[in-house]
Image (spheres, rainbow, N blue to C red):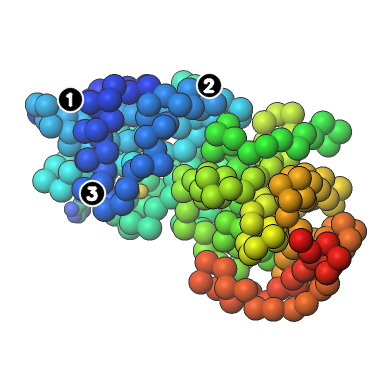
Amino acid sequence: MNTIERHTAPLSEALRIDLTEFWSNIFQTSFADLQVVLAGGEVGQNVDIILIAREGATITATCHLTVSRLNPRLGGLGEIATAPQSRGKGLAAQLVERAIVAATASGCTQLVLGTVNETAARLYAKFGFRYLPGTRVMLRNADGTEGLGSAPFDRRDIKIVAGAPCHRLTIIPPILTATDHAILDANVELLATRLADQTSCMGLYPRYERLAKKGGQWFVAQASNGLTIGIASVIGVTSGIAQVDGFVVPKVGADVLASLFQAAILWGEAMGFAIQSVCGVDDLNKRAVIVAQDSGYEETALLTIAGHPVPILRFSPKRGRLL
Ligand SMILES: CC(C)(COP(=O)(O)OP(=O)(O)OC[C@H]1O[C@@H](n2cnc3c(N)ncnc32)[C@H](O)[C@@H]1OP(=O)(O)O)[C@@H](O)C(=O)NCCC(=O)NCCS
């Protein structure tokens, strides 16, 4: 007989240890990235609800729901797992159903999750999740429609802000949205979905988190309704040189992309770096933004991003600006 518990971050240390052990055994990866979240380190930015099935004291299944406080219409599911001996009894289905109810109660109308597991995908499809084209990410719109849609936003009220945990969920839709750019952000190995399937969902934010831990910085173009409409990042790549890259969603003007690049360039220069930028060879919009920033020598090259060779233009710093 299984019972279901609902916990909201912050979780006790004992529960964090039990969950981490449970997930590590099933997924065979480290859950170090998640510790801050489970300990309540993001309670001001996101709501994290963990649903746990137990048989006696033993954890048999879990499901983790994250709802963005910046854009409460958006939520994500992760850590959906059932212990091998408890599979096929409907536990995952019960927890996903409860998670959808909890998400709906928080005003969440769009739920995303990433999966390459066919058993899991069939289960999610029963609850209305559908794969987004060019991704291994499934989306469930509460109104039954398909696709991410494009919520309207006020073009006069867009802020460029430093990337933060409040963007954990909001960066997912723009990364999965078809765009003019070939490379979205070379610094975190993000390609457009038309070039390579995007297999990550809740794993996208941790890429930027790791970039920041390695001494880089990233910026978000944020609409007043909480939507993320573009991202740029900067990180040291070779001695004295930092690489800048970024993207905006379709229909957002080059001025927003330019503002994002400028934020990243200014940050890199303030840290004492000369700046190098890259873009896909056919990415005329990004090239125009880079050229307007007077970014140095243009050369063509082949860059391997996420295992895919992509022809690029690299704008290396002018010699005079090298340190
Ligand atoms: C995917 C997973 C969570 C499903 O958990 P579960 O508790 O067994 O799922 P449920 O019992 O609710 O069953 C869901 C569906 O999968 C089927 N299923 C579950 N386990 C199965 C198994 N071992 N063999 C065949 N089918 C299985 C069920 O028959 C059910 O389909 P149905 O409704 O058509 O009968 C579980 O297999 C798992 O933990 N896998 C490893 C971790 C993972 O990949 N998680 C998904 C990450 S997105």
Mark sitting on residue 26? 3
Q: Amino acid at mark 2?
A: Gly
Which element carries disc 2, helix, strand or loop? loop
Residue at x 86% of width, y 48% of height: 255
Residue topped by disc 1:
3
Residue at x 25% of width, y 46% of height: 24
**Of the image marks 3 and 1, the number of the one nearer the N terminus:** 1
- 193 to the left or right of 67: right
Judge: label 3 CB < 8 Å from ligand 1. Answer: yes
- 121 to the left or right of 164: left
Q: Amino acid at mark 3?
A: Ile
- Residue 194's x, y, as percent? 61, 66
Mark sitting on residue 44? 2
Q: Quadrant of the C terminus?
A: bottom right
Work out whether 258 lies above or below 16. below
Residue at the farthest front position: 323
Q: Residues within 10 Å of mark 3 (few under 14, many from 20)?
A: some
Q: Residues within 10 Å of mark 2 (few under 14, many from 20)?
A: few
- In front here: 300 or 252? 300
- In front here: 74 or 33? 33
Which element carries disc 1, helix, strand or loop? strand
